[in-house]
Amino acid sequence: MTAMNDQRVLATMQMDSLAQLLQSYLNVRAAVLRAIEDSRISDEDIETTLRITYSTAFRRRKNPDSWRPAELALLAATLSLPTAPFSRLEKLADQLVELPAERRYSLMKACQLDNAKLQARRRDFYLWQHKELERMTSVLRNQR
């Protein structure tokens, strides 16, 4: 009975750690997007920093979900905002894999992740999509 309780406590701590990681990422992401919206960084600076064309920058501005974590990390650095939450995304897939199977599968299902996507994100953490991270944060919040 104690071993089972210990496993539950450990799983809850792991889920809380995931929730904190995701929330810190989403907070900095929101700050970067606000800075872009408030024109604290010019279109030219965005294009130069990210080495993208005007049309790509325009599309990103029109659809904020299309910003990639790597692009937002570079913009955060340019804006003197924290960049650590972006690099912490590197550990997200590994932390998911370490969850007990039942919790991992229910979380992956809720986020529409399959094993192939999870493995791809383990290899390159900048492949995480904003919608996946938002869904995961929401699911983790509701499981508390």
Image (cartoon, rainbow, N blue to C red):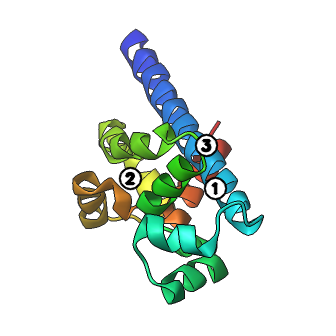
Kind of residue at disc 3: Gln
Which of marks 1 and 2 precedes in the sequence? 1
Please tell me whether residue 70 is drawn above or below residue 53 in the rendered image: above
- Secondary element under disc 2, as helix, strand or loop, is helix
Determine which residue is flagged by label 3: 23
Query: Disc 2 to disc 3, how far (Cα)?
Result: 21 Å
| Three-letter amino acid code at the position of disc 2 | Tyr
Q: Is residue 33 above or below residue 107?
A: below
At 54% across and 79% down in the image, what residue appears? 57
| Residue located 57% across and 85% down the image | 59
In this rendering, position of residue 20 left or right of residue 74: right
In three-dimensional space, the C-alpha distance between marks 2 and 1, rounded to whole angstroms, equals 32 Å
Earlier-in-chain disc, 2 versus 3: 3
- Looking at the rendering, which quadrant does residue 131 occupy? bottom right
Q: Position of residue 114 (x, y in %)?
A: 33, 65
Give the residue pinned by disc 1: 32
Identify residue for label 2.
105
Residues at marks 2 and 1 touching, judged by CB atoms closer than 8 Å: no
Check disc 1 and report its element: helix, strand or loop.
Answer: helix
* Outermost top residue: 2
Is 142 or 5 nearer to us in this picture? 142
Q: Could you tell me residue 64's position as x and y percent?
A: 62, 72
Q: Amino acid under label 1?
A: Val
Earlier along the polypeptide chain: callout 3 or callout 1? 3
- Name the side, left or right, on which 55 lies relative to 97: right
